[in-house]
Image (tube, rainbow, N blue to C red):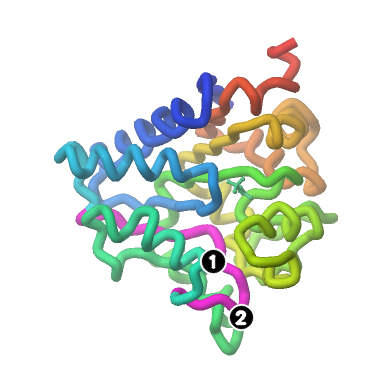
Amino acid sequence: MKVIRAKDSCEAGAFAAELIAAQVKQKPVCVLGLATGSTPLDTYAQLIAAYRAGELDFSCVRSVNLDEYVGLGPDHDQSYAWFMWHNLFERINIDPHNTHIPDGITANPDAECQRYDALIASLGGVDLQLLGIGPNAHIGFNEPGDAFIPETHVVELTDSTISANARFFASVDQVPRQAITMGIRAILQARKVVLIATGTGKAKAVCDAFWGPVTPMVPASILQLHPDFTLVADDDALSLTPSSN
Ligand code: PGA
């Protein structure tokens, strides 16, 4: 594991964007695994700026997103399809046909999970997977549990995740209870993994995941086994790690 330490979330976003930019320049026809949430917004802003400066070309890039809420379609302003379109895709020259997100309003979520794994395989897997981390150390919506689940699957969101995400909805009751998430296999098979963690709210999750044992109760801990894993974290997110004491 490589750790890149940033002074704040803006600098963390710049470092992560540099890693993604390097991937796109080195292999223009690459597959980026993308994430939603507050954390990657600085990274996406940096990528948009690099595109506008003429430094990056996304015309051949394909993308697969980690997850989507069950029950929310792309027209819902809290769906992850909506998030990706407004925070990245409409501002760069990626071909919308080359962007992929699980379908949250499918009539058959289990079939959608199988389709999504087949899609990732047909693209040749992920070249660089970008991740955030939940306060409970989830990656994508792979929640703490008794086992790592390899396949894309429908997940019941934990109370911790529902309350963490309630800030985006009018009330906690409106937060969907289920999501479709890419499983651990596709994440671990990505050729590079970059996880961004910022803020004191992630400090315990970071410490448990990367300075503790590998266990499905701490889903991000599996990344300790990845051969090309980079943690980009700010001082606050690293404040509980042994090296900070
Ligand atoms: P956040 O979410 O970036 O909004 O904190 C991260 C996550 O839950 O993976």
On screen, residue 174 above or below 159: below
Residue at the right extreme of this rendering: 146
- Please indicate whether residue 118 sits to the left or right of residue 243 in the image: left
Q: Between marks 2 and 1, how big is the CA–CA gap?
A: 19 Å
Residue 173 belongs to the span the image colors magenta: no
- Write the residue at 36% across / 42% down: 45
Instruction: Look at discs 2 and 1 and give the one toward the viewer.
Output: 1
Side of 178 relative to 25 (left or right): right
Q: Kindly identify which residue carries mark 2.
A: 109
Residue lying at 78% horizontally and 48% vertically, measured from the top left: 216
The residue lying furthest to the left in this view is 54
Screen quadrant of the C terminus: top right
Q: Earlier in the sequence, mark 2 or mark 1?
A: 1
| Quadrant into which the N terminus falls | top right
Residue range corresponding to the magenta coloring: 59-74
- Give x and y (percent) for residue 228: 51, 33
* Vertical side of 10 occupied by 141: above or below: below
Identify the residue position indicated by label 1 in the image: 78
